[in-house]
Image: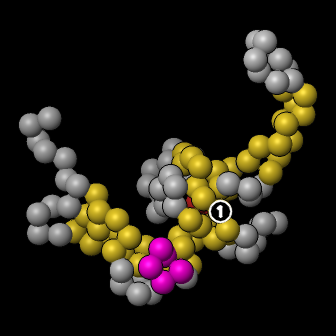
């Protein structure tokens, strides 16, 4: 699996397949090594947790399970539609993530300087 995922933490995404198809949520965590993402309120699983310290709860807790990154689509903050992401390299070396539907720039990734 490739080590690149088209979504980042705090992106709004739409689930396009699976049991939670059609639901939306915010990306809580990404795992590029395995190609999976954790989306808020999606693929809820029950975890049996033992109390380790005085402050940590014990019992059965609900938490988000991972979803394959290919099963999510980014929701464009400008047009509000689920879209694919294009990458455009600018003249100064920075890279933009661009909405494929409306052409709006979603965010910019600065190029790292070579001295640091």
Instruction: Give whichever of 116, 104 is nearer the camera.
Output: 104
Residue ranking furthest to the front: 55
Tell me, yes or no, whether the highlighted magenta stretch contains residue 79. Answer: yes
| Dot 1: element | strand
Residue ranking furthest to the top: 53
Q: Is residue 81 left or right of residue 23?
A: left
Tell me, yes or no, whether the highlighted magenta stretch contains residue 104. Answer: no
Question: Does 30 appear above or below 98?
Answer: above
Task: State the residue at coordinates (80%, 51%).
Answer: 44
**What span is in magenta?**
76-80
Relative image position of residue 84 (x, y in whole percent)? 48, 76
Q: Is residue 25 visible?
A: yes
The residue wearing badge 1 is: 25
Task: State the residue at coordinates (23%, 55%).
Answer: 110
Task: State the residue at coordinates (44%, 55%).
Answer: 4
Residue ranking furthest to the bottom: 102
Relative image position of residue 23 (x, y in whole percent)? 73, 70
Relative image position of residue 69 (x, y in whole percent)? 58, 60
Task: State the residue at coordinates (83%, 17%).
Answer: 51
Relative image position of residue 67 (x, y in whole percent)? 68, 56
Q: Is residue 2 visible?
A: no
**Numbered marks: total:** 1
């Amino acid at each position: 699996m490739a080590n690149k995922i088209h979504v980042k933490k705090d992106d709004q995404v739409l689930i396009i397949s699976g049991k939670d198809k059609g639901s939306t949520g915010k990306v809580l965590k990404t795992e590029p090594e395995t190609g999976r993402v954790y989306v808020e309120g999606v693929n809820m699983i029950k975890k049996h947790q033992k109390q380790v310290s005085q402050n940590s709860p014990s019992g059965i807790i609900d938490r988000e399970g991972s979803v394959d990154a290919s099963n999510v689509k980014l929701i464009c903050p400008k047009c509000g539609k689920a879209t694919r992401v294009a990458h455009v390299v600018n003249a100064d070396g920075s890279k933009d993530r661009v909405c494929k539907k409306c052409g709006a720039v979603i965010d910019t990734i600065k190029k790292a300087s070579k001295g640091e």
